[in-house]
Image (spheres, grey):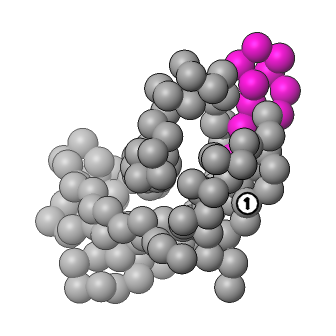
């Protein structure tokens, strides 16, 4: 299957007092990745909410930092799905700098919720097939 690969910029406001990218910025990049993923599979966030009555929420985020990013670094992010259940998903993230050095790894667990009942919502077969494009289980 495929990994979604995208780049992020580092801005001056991303830098913390220590001089490297603040930890919270990685979560912002992960949020951007989820948006890119939904667009890549043909189910933009607004479509998921407005046409299917489903919201995707995150119920767990984990990040392991290996090497910091600084203001002039370029950030390449790889994203894929490592587990796809009926109403949940596990997404994996890898962060690299412009020298292809591995800088961080992340994982997020997401849950699909029905906007009316606020209970878990099973993915339709169409949505499941769309997500499978980025499913890598090994």
Q: Quadrant of the C terminus?
A: bottom right
* Residue stretch in magenta: 109-120
* Residue nearest the viewer, comparing 100 with 34: 34
Magenta run includes residue 115 = yes
Q: Quadrant of the N terminus?
A: bottom right
Please name the residue that numbered disc 1 is placed on.
Answer: 84
- Please count the marks in the image: 1
Within the image, what quadrant is residue 35 found in?
Answer: top left
In the image, is residue 123 above or below residue 7?
above
Q: Residue 95 in the image: x percent, y percent?
A: 41, 71
At x 82%, y 34%, the residue is: 120
Q: Residue 33 in the image: x percent, y percent?
A: 43, 52
Q: Residue 109 in the image: x percent, y percent?
A: 70, 53
Q: Residue 3 in the image: x percent, y percent?
A: 46, 72
Is 7 situated left or right of 62 in this image? left
In the image, is residue 13 above or below residue 120?
below
Magenta run includes residue 36 = no
In the image, is residue 68 above or below residue 7?
below
Residues packed near mark 1 inside 10 Å, few (<14), some (14 to 19) or many (20 plus): some
* Residue nearest the viewer, comparing 16 with 51: 51
Please tell me whether mark 1 sits on a helix, a strand or a loop.
strand
In the image, is residue 111 above or below residue 133?
above
At x 72%, y 49%, the residue is: 125
Is 100 situated left or right of 58 in this image? left
At x 20%, y 49%, the residue is: 11
At x 20%, y 69%, the residue is: 73
């Amino acid at each position: 299957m495929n990994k979604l690969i995208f780049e992020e910029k580092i801005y001056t406001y991303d830098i913390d007092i220590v001089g490297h990218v603040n930890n919270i910025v990685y979560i912002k990049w992960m949020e951007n990745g989820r948006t890119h993923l939904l667009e890549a599979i043909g189910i933009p966030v607004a479509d998921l909410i407005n046409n299917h009555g489903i919201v995707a929420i995150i119920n767990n985020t984990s990040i392991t930092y290996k090497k910091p990013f600084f203001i002039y670094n370029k950030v390449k992010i790889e994203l894929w799905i490592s587990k796809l259940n009926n109403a949940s998903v596990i997404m994996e993230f890898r962060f690299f700098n412009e020298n292809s050095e591995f800088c961080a790894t992340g994982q997020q667990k997401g849950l699909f919720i029905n906007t009316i009942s606020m209970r878990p919502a099973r993915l339709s077969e169409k949505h499941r097939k769309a997500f499978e494009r980025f499913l890598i289980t090994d």
